[in-house]
Image (cartoon, grey):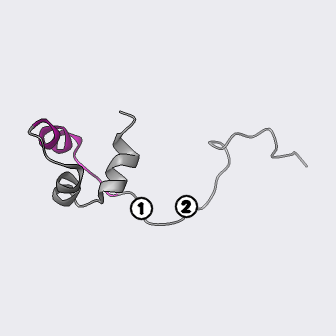
Amino acid sequence: MKSDINKTKDTIKTKSMGRPNKKVDEKVIANLSQIGCTQEEIGSVVGISARTLQRRYAPI
C-alpha cells in the first residue's frame, strides 16, 4: 500500500465542502473598480460579499 504522504494537495482527490464558487465577470469588476466603486458596491453588483471579493481578487 502506497503512502499518501508524498502526494501534493492538488493530487489528492477530496470532496469539496461549502458552496460552489459563483461565476463572476472579471471585466465588470475591473470597470466598476476603475470608476471608483467601493468593494461593497462591487460585491453587491456582482452578487458576492466584499470579503469574498477581497479573498478572490486581491492577489491579482
Rendering quarter of residue 43: bottom left
Determine the residue located farthest toward the top in the rendered image: 60
Task: Give the vertical position of 32 relative to 21 (above or below).
Answer: above
Image point (18%, 49%), residue name: 38
Quadrant where the image shows the C terminus: top left
| Residue at the spot of label 2 | 16
The residue indicated by pointer 1 is 20
Farthest residue in the bottom direction?
A: 18
The image quadrant of residue 51 is bottom left
Residue at (35% x, 47% y) in the render: 54
Q: Position of residue 8 (x, y in %)?
A: 69, 39
Q: Which mark is residue 5?
A: none
Instruction: Mark 1 and mark 2 in contact? Answer it, CB < 8 Å.
Output: yes
Q: Is residue 38 left or right of residue 11?
A: left
* Residue 39 image position (x, y, % from top left): 23, 50
Q: From the viewer's perspective, is 24 left or right of 20?
A: left
Q: Amino acid at mark 1?
A: Pro
SS under mark 1 = loop
Name the side, left or right, on which 15 lies relative to 21: right
Looking at the image, which is closer to me, 31 or 27?
31
The 10 Å Cα crowd at callout 1, few under 14, some 14 to 19, many 20 or more, is few
Name the residue at 17% across, 55% down.
41
Q: CA distance from mark 1 to mark 2?
A: 8 Å
Q: Which residues are magenta?
A: 22-34
**In magenta segment, residue 33:** yes
Give x and y (percent) for residue 52: 36, 54
Q: In the rendered structure, does residue 58 fall within the stretch colored magenta?
A: no
The prevailing secondary structure element of the residues shown in magenta is helix
Q: Amino acid at mark 2?
A: Ser
